Amino acid sequence: MAALVEKYRHPILTKYGEMAKEVGGHGGMDFIMDSRLVYCLQNGLPLDMDVYDLAEWCCLAELGELSMDNGCAAVAFPDFTRGEWNKVRGYSHAYAAPADEAAAMEKAKAFTAALKERGAKEWAAE
């Protein structure tokens, strides 16, 4: 069974799985989703989520408030897709070419280092 699981392990889980276990957050899933979002933005790729995902994520706070205001009663979850929630039309995860990915990573590391340096100077001045 372990060999089968490893054979079909998704590349995103392979890339971020161990880091996600260390960081945590809903079993590491928060870290994986955030990392993938940053990866797509850094590499100019289409996001793995669409406007329907955004609507679903954003309505959770409001629905939670409605539920809690009513004694934690169940609240109907709106179907923003109008019944099309399980229809995927040609979706696949986008990946950057290895050279582009490496260049984006180096640019991100340099930017982070510059921010840390600037922050250290500002903190020292205070």
Image: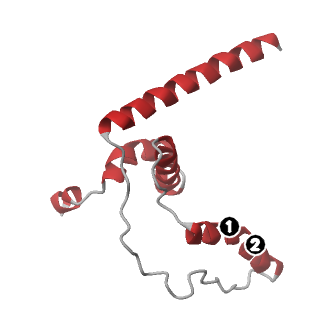
Against 59, residue 25 (above or below) is: above
Tell me the amino acid under the disc marked 2: Glu
Name the residue beneath numbered marker 1. 58
Give residue 90's position: percent from left, percent from top. 35, 71
- Secondary structure found at label 1: helix
Nearer to the camera, 121 or 107: 107
Name the residue beneath numbered marker 2. 62
Nearer to the camera, 75 or 58: 58
Nearer to the camera, 44 or 61: 44
- Secondary structure found at label 2: helix
* Distance Cα–Cα, label 2 vs label 1: 8 Å
Query: Residue 7's image quarter?
Result: bottom left
Against 66, residue 51 (above or below) is: above
Viewed as shown, does residue 73 lie left or right of 111?
right
Give residue 31's position: percent from left, percent from top. 50, 49
Determine whether label 2 and label 1 are within 8 Å by CB: yes
* Residue at left offset 52%, top offset 57%: 26
Viewed as shown, does residue 57 lie left or right of 15?
right
Against 93, residue 109 (above or below) is: above
Figure quadrant of the N terminus: bottom left
Q: In the image, which is nearer the foreground, mark 2 or mark 1?
A: 1
Viewed as shown, does residue 73 lie left or right of 101?
right
